[in-house]
Amino acid sequence: RGKNVEALAELDALGGSLNTMEIVMKSFALMSLMRADEAIRLVESLPEADRKIPGVALIRAEYAAGKNLPAVVASNVVLAAVSPLLINRVRGLFPYLGEHKQWRAILDSDNENVPYTDCTHALIAVYAGLELNDIFRASKSLKAGLAAWPNDPRFIGGLYMLAARRPGSEWEELFADNIRLNVAGLDADRLASYMEYCFKISRPDLAWLLYGKLRQTDPRDPALYLAPAQFGAAWFIFRRHQLGIAAEDRELKIDLREFCRQTMNIEPFGSFWKRVP
């Protein structure tokens, strides 16, 4: 309640040894009074078994973040995460852990069974999974994030990375749906970046959509000239599976340039090709 001085006085008045809860309360009061070193020493004075209690471990992790000790934060968030009740506070340390590339600690301390309350935490968990090449965990985190924020454009990057690793999977379609639903609200920088994503996963149809929107948004944007130069060879290349063409391998591709030339003046193909940038 903000009465930290009074709390300290009452705890000191108890005399004798304080129990674990009282020590934690005193440490909190000291930290609130900007007496960080005293607060940390007090918690660190607890027996090892008490320091591993989830609530105490979380406090140690939060204190360590303030002292910029990423390894200490990493080891303690995993202990704290044993309690589902603390997961959201644990996730509050994900940005710090991500900044210091503590990917394993992020995965080991997350719990996808507890709904995310902050989109950033879900995104960091997805990225941690990808950094560790743990596609299963990255997928679970992304699904949990999408359950809370369906079609949120902040997930486009994660969807792209999973689609790139799993061509023709559900992630590609989720990526495509997200692009289509959000293209109208994307700024020029994102339109250009996501256009590159689309060409890299052989989805020129989506790249065309983004290109057209970018041309409307800023006709002088350099990406309008750079994209054809960089991806001209991929402008009409699709995976056969995407077009409904039988293929033994989902990654087998087909170049539609010749088909385009032959059907340019034949309807209904002609009308379609005229809309392609």
Image: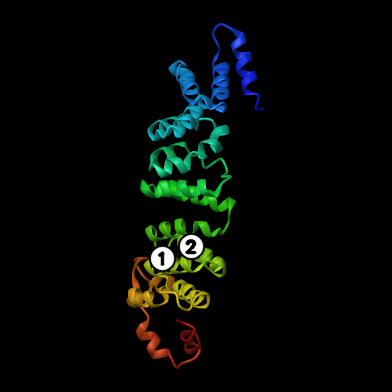
Callout 2 secondary element: helix
* Residue 40, x across and y down, in percent: 47, 23
Residue 202 vs residue 87: left or right?
A: left
Taking depth in this image into account, of 269 and 122 the one nearest to the observer is: 122
Q: How many labels, in total?
A: 2
Picture coordinates of residue 250 (x, y %)? 37, 65
User: In the image, what residue type sits under mark 1?
Assistant: Tyr
Please state, as top left, top right, bottom left or bottom right, where the N terminus lies in the image. Answer: top right
Residue displayed at 44% across by 49% down: 138
Q: Nearer the viewer, mark 1 or mark 2?
A: 1
x, y percent for residue 121: 51, 45
Residue 67 lies, with reference to residue 215, above or below; the image says above
Residue identified by numbered label 1: 197
Tell me if label 1 and label 2 are in contact, CB under 8 Å: yes
Identify the colour scheme used. Answer: rainbow
Could you say which is closer to the camera, residue 72 or residue 34? 34
For residue 175, the mark is 2
Q: Amino acid at mark 2?
A: Phe
Q: Which mark is residue 210?
A: none
Does residue 244 show up? no
Quadrant position of residue 165? bottom left
